[in-house]
Image (spheres, rainbow, N blue to C red):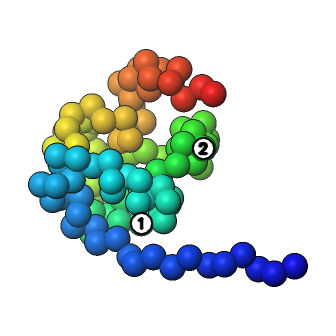
Amino acid sequence: MPEPEKKFTAPLDPRVFDSEEFQQNPFPIYRHLRDAHPVYHDRFHNRWIISRYRDVDHCFRDNDSFDRAMYQPDGPYQFGKDHVFGPNILEYGNSGEHRRLRNIVAGQFVG
């Protein structure tokens, strides 16, 4: 049986996330991430971006393997503070506030 054709795509420049274009319309980059880099290691911002629904759903359900707290060398991350995407984003934190907000949107992830 022949092997499937491998698709090679150019690496994504992580500085795109700081661009005005991304801030105005992030959806083309999100599509590119889903299609070409579904699990993307952004070394510039020291984070992983998971862009496909089934992968995000898996990560949200597996609290033992995945920690959504942001690393801070000088102390714990304060939920919803000082992030480019704005306050109260759900991808950061494992606090009670994170769980409360996660429960609000959890129904949207049910198939």
Q: Secondary structure at mark 2?
A: helix
Circle 2 packing at 10 Å, graded few (<14), some (14-19), many (20+), is: few
User: Residue 41 bears which disc, if any?
Assistant: 1
Instruction: Say if residue 43 shows up in the picture.
Output: no
Q: Number of numbered discs present?
A: 2
Amino acid type of the residue tagged 2 in the rendering: Arg
Give how far across and how far down residue 88 sits, in percent.
27, 31
Q: Earlier in the sequence, mark 2 or mark 1?
A: 1
Residue drawn at x 60%, y 26% is 110
Q: Quadrant of residue 86?
A: top left
Name the mark nearer the viewer: 2 or 1.
Answer: 2
What x and y, as percent, mark residue 106?
A: 51, 24
| 28 with respect to 74 (left or right) | right
Dividing the picture into quadrants, the one containing residue 58 is top right
Residue at x-position 33% and y-position 54%: 28
Residue in the image at 47% along x and 64% along y: 37
Q: Tag 1: residue type?
A: His
- Whether residue 92 appears in this view of the structure is yes
